[in-house]
Image: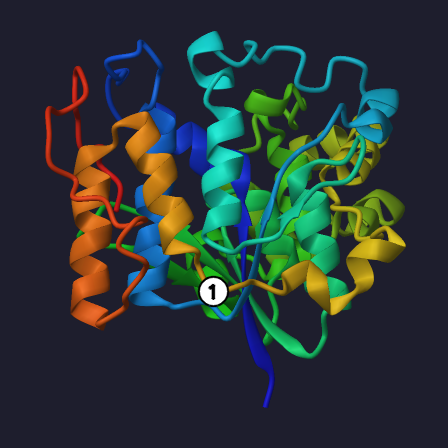
């Protein structure tokens, strides 16, 4: 029986936490809303999944290979807000305190590293916490996604059947599906006039973009045939851009890559106290009391006191 590992796309959750509500800052003027939201998410994972194996994967540097293919790749994205940037170090501290290894590789996007973990760790059932549709290309009987939702909905499972239900194509066709649609958020152009319904219909009829390019006469719709023929180079480039790379550095091929430790509740509470995350502290203490988990009295923090300025409970976990 396989072990189970939960792999978290760090910045997907960080941005989600940051934009879930208005900025939060403490009495020292430190911004804390993203740390608060991410910490609540990690506590949610402990409460509902109690991961024994897992990792939090960060983007690092620029996506050099994709930028070489498409210089304008993601060039339309705004820089990270300074109010969020200053919270990243504290987020990394809280991740480590919860026991997760932090995984990143130079000039690699998190999606690629996650895909690499999914491919190489064959003795694990992998659950990827992300809403990124690109990740659907790695789903199979062993690899699934958990899509973050609202507090009531929690995490929604996305396996093979759910991919087919949502996109009307199989995971193995997701790359071609997205190559036809393009991705405005990544500055990847799509096939003009081809939307989700048409892209799925074409792949169900003709299986792949390469098959349509190599055998254009099988396409019965003249306008679509013309678009495929005249945009063949763009479509092939899009496939390369969207296909996730799965190589991993030697150090990340070891089981320690997903070797999550037991949360250090004392450290978690200390970080939260320093940042004045009073609501989170109370949630942790309630969880520990319910599980009869004890920590040293010197590390246990009451969670009592004045709330941070603009305290807000974001619409997530």
Report whether residue 224 is seen. yes
Which residue does the numbered mark 1 point to in the structure image?
A: 262
**What percent of the width, then of the height, locates residue 6?**
52, 62
Q: Residues within 10 Å of mark 1 (few under 14, many from 20)?
A: some
Which of 151 and 139 lies nearest the eye of the viewer? Answer: 151
Q: What residue is at 64 percent from the left and 19 percent from the top?
A: 187
Report whether residue 221 is seen. no
Would residue 291 be found to the left or right of residue 189 on screen?
left
**What percent of the width, then of the height, locates residue 39?**
36, 42
**What percent of the width, then of the height, locates residue 214?**
89, 47
Which of 50 and 114 lies nearest the eye of the viewer? Answer: 50
Name the quadrant of the N terminus: bottom right
**What percent of the width, then of the height, locates residue 22?**
24, 17
Q: Residue furthest front?
A: 298
Would residue 285 be found to the left or right of residue 221 on screen?
left
Q: What residue is at 70 percent from the left and 36 percent from the top?
A: 109
Which of 194 and 106 lies nearest the eye of the viewer? Answer: 106
């Amino acid at each position: 029986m396989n072990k189970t590992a939960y792999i978290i796309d760090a910045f997907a959750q960080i941005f989600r936490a940051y934009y879930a509500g208005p900025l939060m800052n403490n009495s020292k003027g430190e911004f804390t809303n993203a740390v608060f939201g991410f910490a609540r998410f990690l506590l949610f994972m402990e409460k509902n999944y109690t991961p024994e194996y897992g990792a939090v994967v960060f983007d690092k540097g620029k996506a050099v290979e994709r930028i070489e293919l498409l210089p304008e790749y993601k060039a339309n994205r705004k820089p990270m807000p300074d109010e969020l940037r200053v919270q990243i170090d504290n987020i990394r501290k809280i991740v480590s305190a919860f026991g997760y290894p932090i995984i990143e590789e130079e000039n690699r996007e998190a999606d690629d590293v996650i895909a690499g973990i999914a491919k190489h760790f064959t003795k694990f059932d992998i659950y990827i916490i992300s809403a990124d549709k690109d990740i659907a290309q790695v789903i199979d009987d062993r690899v699934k996604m958990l899509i973050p939702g609202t507090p009531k909905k929690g995490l929604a499972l996305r396996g093979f059947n759910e991919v087919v239900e949502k996109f009307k194509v199989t995971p193995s066709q997701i790359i071609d599906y997205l190559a036809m649609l393009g991705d405005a958020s990544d500055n990847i152009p799509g096939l003009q006039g081809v939307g989700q319904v048409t892209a799925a219909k074409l792949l169900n009829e003709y299986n792949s973009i390469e098959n349509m390019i190599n055998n254009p006469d099988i396409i019965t719709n003249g306008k679509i045939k013309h678009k495929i023929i005249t945009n063949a180079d763009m479509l092939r480039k899009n496939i390369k851009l969207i296909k996730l790379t799965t190589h991993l550095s030697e150090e990340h091929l070891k089981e320690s890559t997903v070797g999550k430790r037991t949360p250090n509740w004392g450290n978690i509470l200390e970080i939260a106290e320093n940042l004045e995350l009073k609501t989170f502290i109370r949630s942790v203490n309630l969880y520990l009391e319910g599980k009869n988990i004890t920590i040293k009295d010197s590390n246990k923090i009451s969670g009592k006191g004045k709330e941070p300025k603009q305290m807000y409970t974001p619409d997530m976990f």
